[in-house]
Each structure stands twice: as structure tokens, then as C-alpha cells.
Image (cartoon, grey):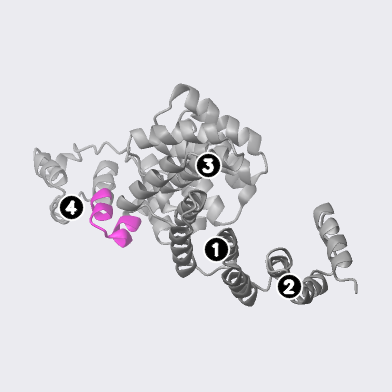
Amino acid sequence: MIKYLTINILLFLTLNTASAQGNSTDSLQHYLQIQEYAKAVSWLKTVEPGSYNKEYLLNLGYCYYMNGDGKNALAVYQKLNEKEPDNLQANLYLGIIYQKMKKYVQALQFYKNLTQIQPGQYKYWLYAASMFSILEMSDSAFAYTGKAYQISPQAPDAVLRYSSGLSLQKQRDKAIAVINSYLKTDSTNTDVIARKINYSARDAKYKEVIFWGEQLLKDSATEPLAYTDLAYAYLNTKQIDKCLSLCDWMELNNMKNESLTYCAAQCYAQQKNYTKSNLLLDECLQQNLVSTAVIYFRSKADNYEATKEYKKAIAQYDSSYFIFHHPTDLYYKARVYDMYLKDKTQATVFYKKYVAEKQKPESPAEEQLFQYIREYIKP
């Protein structure tokens, strides 16, 4: 993909184009330096050599490309490629142009050529891997990414791509090892640190998340997902004030997201500020009523149970069930009638509905729950 092609143009434009240009190359160099590519093209056309001249065509193709004229740039580089199939610049720009045209099969061929022309340049292997990924040829994409990492194991983009590939190959431990190996020699790259935080958060290694997350904070890096993981690490280690402070800072820096809002809601619930917690949970619901929103309804219900507002708790379970039709909400509703309101009639109604919809327990805990319900609803 284009975003993966952080092309550091390796072209050193040979401005001694042809004897026909005489000593006028300073004019071309001037246009290139001030990025007047249209004028550079016009100037080149005034000195066009009559026969094939590699340096001239390299300059012309580059100026067309930088001027946004992909069609003419393509024609120039194709002419170069026909004459010199191993020309690095021609293959590079043909790959880039075809990729921008979304002709990924053609782009792949030229990127593969680059891996043969300069097999020790890891980026060319990554470029080819990107095309394989777009073409859904995952095995080849992984192989080429692995080759890029093998060539340059301390290149951040190779590290990140290879660790992602390993994760997709269900080799998560190896993916983590790749990230850890990189961080032993370079602990400054924010993208790699963010990946480390992501892996640690999934494994509930909150101390690691906090260590690396606070390093990102110190550097004022823009990594909203990593900071969200840090916020949850603070929440799960009962560092509520730090968590809320981070949430406020992220909001001020335009990094607020739904998951962060939910985290802040949980913090306020921990502080028994259920009113503020519910306001934030309402915000979550407004942001995105999708399947995960069921946890927001249930969290609001928990808050209302904590404040002994049982009817409001039941209303949250009703809303959740109405939208998502999860039988668990029927159980929670029955439990409120059973444990708090001591209304056996209503509790029995909803316990029966829960059992009817659930049909059979799916875990030892649910088996115990079913047994309790059977005893409870006996005449």
C-alpha cells in the first residue's frame, strides 16, 4: 500500500545529460532545486537528444513524475526499461506509478525486479510484500517481509511488518520476541514502542504497559491507541487519578475515543461518582450503538444497583435486551427482582425466559446457575 512506501528517492540525477546540453545543466538544476518541474520539463524538451540517452530520460521521467504527469512519466520509464531492463530507477518508478494506478500485478513485477537488482536493499522486499498483501497472496507477502527483516533486523518498518506477519501466522510469541529484540538496541522509536504496549496490554502485563506508555508520554508522542492501553493499565492497577488525568490530557490533545470514554466512566464508578460515570456511558452509547455497547448498558445497570436504584438498573437491562437480544440480560433482570426487590413472581418470569432462550449451559458456572434457577422456580 502507498502508506507503506515511504520512498526515499535514491536517485542521484546525473545532470551531465548529454553533450547537446553543453554547459546549460545549471538551468535544469535550478528548476529542480526550486521544484519548478513543469519548467524543468519544458527546458529538457528544448535540448532533447535525437537518439537514446539514459541520463536524459531519467531526468525527464523524474520531472514528469514530480509534476504529477504519471502518463508521460510512465511512457519515459517504459522506454528506459525496454532498453535497460535492470535499470534501478526505471523499475522503481514503474512500480510506484503502476501502484498509484492500482495496477498491482504490474507494480509487483517491477518491485520483484528490484529485489533482484539490489537484493540487499530491504525496502524493495517490503514494497513487493505490500503488493502481495493487496493481491491476497499472504504466504508470499510473509516470505518477502521475512526476507526484509532478515536483511535489516533493526529497520523499524521491517520490524513492524514482520511482527504483524508473525501474528497473522499465529506465531505471537515470536512476534513479541522480534519487538523485544529491537527495543534492546533502540528504545526510541514510538511506533515500535506502541506495538510493544499493544502486545503487553493483551497479555495483561500492566507494569510493562505503564513503563513504555509513560516513556511515550514523556516524549509527547502521538499514539492514541497506546495511550488508551496505558489508561486501562492505570485503571486495572487502581491508579484512578493517573487514569483520569491521562484521559483529560488525551481529550485536550484530540486523542479521545470511545474506549477511552468508557475507561473514564469506569474510573468514576470506582470513585462512586455514578452520575458522572453514567453521563460518560451515555456518551459511549451515542458514539456507537454496536454490539460492544451491551457492556455500557450493563455498566450503567451496575451503577444503578450500587446506588440502589433498582428500577433504573432493570431499565438498562431492558434496553440492552431490546437492542441486542442477549439472554444474559434476562438473567440480570431476574437477578435484580430476586436479590434486591424480593419479587419472586417477576424473578421467576425472567429466569424462565432466560433458560428458554439459553436452552443449555455452556460452562460449569452456567451449569450451577441453571441448577439454582431450577430450584428457585419450583412450585
Q: Earlier in the sequence, mark 2 or mark 4?
A: 4
> What residue is rendered at 47% in x and 39% in y?
239
Q: In which quarter of the view is residue 375 placed?
A: bottom right
Q: Which residues are magenta?
A: 62-75
Across and down, in percent, residue 237 comes to 54, 38
Q: Residue at x 49, y 33 (%)?
A: 119
The amino acid marked with disc number 1 is: Lys
Among all residues in the image, which is located at the extreme top?
185
Look at 58% across and 58% down and name the residue there: 306
Q: Which residue is mark 2?
A: 343
Which disc is residue 37 wearing? 4
Q: Position of residue 156 (x, y in %)?
A: 45, 34
**Circle 1 residues within 10 Å: few <14, some 14–19, many ≥20:** many
In the rendered structure, find residue 198 and report the number of the disc placed on it.
3
Taking the magenta stretch, the answer to whether it contains residue 64 is yes
Left or right of 302 on screen, residue 85: left
Percent x, y of residue 159: 50, 35
- Of badges 1 and 2, the one in the foreground is 2
Between the residue at mark 3 and the residue at mark 2, the CA separation in whole angstroms equals 46 Å
Q: Which residue is mark 1?
A: 300
Residue at 43% over, 27% down: 187
Q: Amino acid at mark 3?
A: Asn
The amino acid type, in three-letter code, at marker 4 is Tyr
Mark 1 and mark 2: Cα distance apart in space:
22 Å
State which mark lies toward you, 3 or 2: 2
